Amino acid sequence: MMLMATALLALSLHGTPDTALTTTDVTFTTSDGQRLGGEVFRPAHATGELPGLLLVHGSGQGNSWRELKAEAEAFARQGMVVLAPDKRSAGYSKTHRDYGQLADDALKAFAVLKRQPAVGHAGIWGLSEGGWVAPIAASRAKDVEFLVTVGGPGLSPLRTQSWNATNKVDRSGVQGSLRTAYARTFHRLAGDAGLFPEAHYDPSRTLASLTQPVLALWGAQDNQVMPAESAQRFLSGVHTSLTVKFFPGAPHALHTGPDTLTPGYPETVGSWVRRVAAGDVPASSAQPLPAQPARSVDTPPSAWWESWQLQVGAMVLMLLVFLWYGVRRRSPGSWPARVLALCGALSIAGLVYTMLSLLLTSNGAGVSTGPLLLHRPIAWLAAQLLAAATALASLTCLAKWRTASARVRVAAVAGAAFIPWALYWGLLVP
């Protein structure tokens, strides 16, 4: 009996899985004065010192702690005291966010976690975007004693989003130049224009600066963050104890449903955290990299001729010339210029419509393309056909340059500029 009692006491001190939980409301204040809430989860019947774990949200403005409730409950049942905080809304949007500021928010919440009764060794867990934020927080505070990432991106946000967008377009059945035009060209333009926050943030320096043990987890079927490439960056960048694991068939957030986690995931986190908290830091290890459907493509800042000012300015100027010619009184023998002006204006409109419709319908499930013809959205296919007509009409006008009127020459110059512009955007590419 004495031996059994001793064993039960040891298991309790090390945080055994416990199905009964207690919760506590907490608040914390960010450095810029924003007051945020949160919820602390702990095993109801555990005794002794327990590991603490702060959860850091993925992307989203003003996310509630309730969005992390499934993880918080599952991890607390593994013998941890878990804090699920709210996420800021002020200073965070689709076009602006600061990972350093989010990391500071995380450390403010982490201080609250450390003050909870019976919390001993403590660390931070970050999901998706939190996989950029949590390492920054860990690199700034030595009392963060371990780090867990789930679906953590190992490359820049813009490169990750470009890969994500390519996957969405591919799943929709789209083929041809639109894949690159939307996923790379359009996203790079948005990033260069400052419409894509933290576009070129490089996590490699932060990963290299970590001194805490790291557990990095990915779903092998992650289609939002490239799992194999991200793991490679962690393996090459992290110089402390690193454990890399993949869950076969699992998606990005390791959820099988809205409130259901992938089998084995909470247990993996729980056993690793308890081991590290007990002072038994594991040697670095990594499972084989999963098959990734496609490699990501680098998305460096654009060259001068690709700059958003030049690209948008050229589009607007060409559109104004086409519309100016179209509303003027027609003169005999100018039909190629009329074709050029009409088709050019409509082609530009088709491109803008296609890009914005894909962007605005994009969500976690994919994108809405509408009906496809020849594996292309109808608006995009029409824009391509109109671009071809514009190019032919432009060449015809240029061939008649000597006999053309001044108005036709202006239209021809706009048409000549349209050809390389349309090639760059994939309108004249299959």
Image: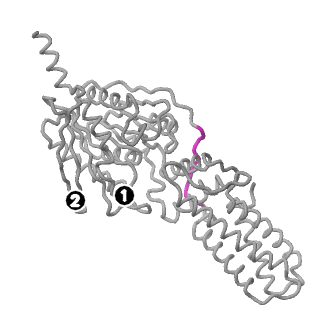
Tell me which numbered mark, 1 or 2, is placed earlier along the sequence: 2
Q: Which residue is mark 1?
A: 61
Quarter in which the C terminus is drawn: bottom right
Horizontal side of 427 relative to 302 (left or right) equals: right
State which quadrant residue 357 falls in.
Answer: bottom right
Amino acid type, label 2: Arg
Q: Which residue is mark 2?
A: 35
Q: Residue at x 43, y 40 (%)?
A: 151
- Residue 182 versus residue 18: which sits nearer the camera? 18
Q: Position of residue 423 (x, y in %)?
A: 72, 61
- Residue 308 versus residue 249: which sits nearer the camera? 249
C-alpha gap between disc 1 and disc 2: 15 Å
Horizontal side of 144 relative to 318 (left or right) equals: left
Q: Residue at x 70, y 72 (%)?
A: 346
Name the magenta segment's main secondary structure.
Answer: loop
Instruction: Residue 297: say if magenta.
Output: yes
Q: Position of residue 379 (x, y in %)?
A: 68, 63
Horizontal side of 162 relative to 323 (left or right) equals: left
- For the record, the magenta segment spans 293-302
Q: Residue at x 71, y 68 (%)?
A: 347
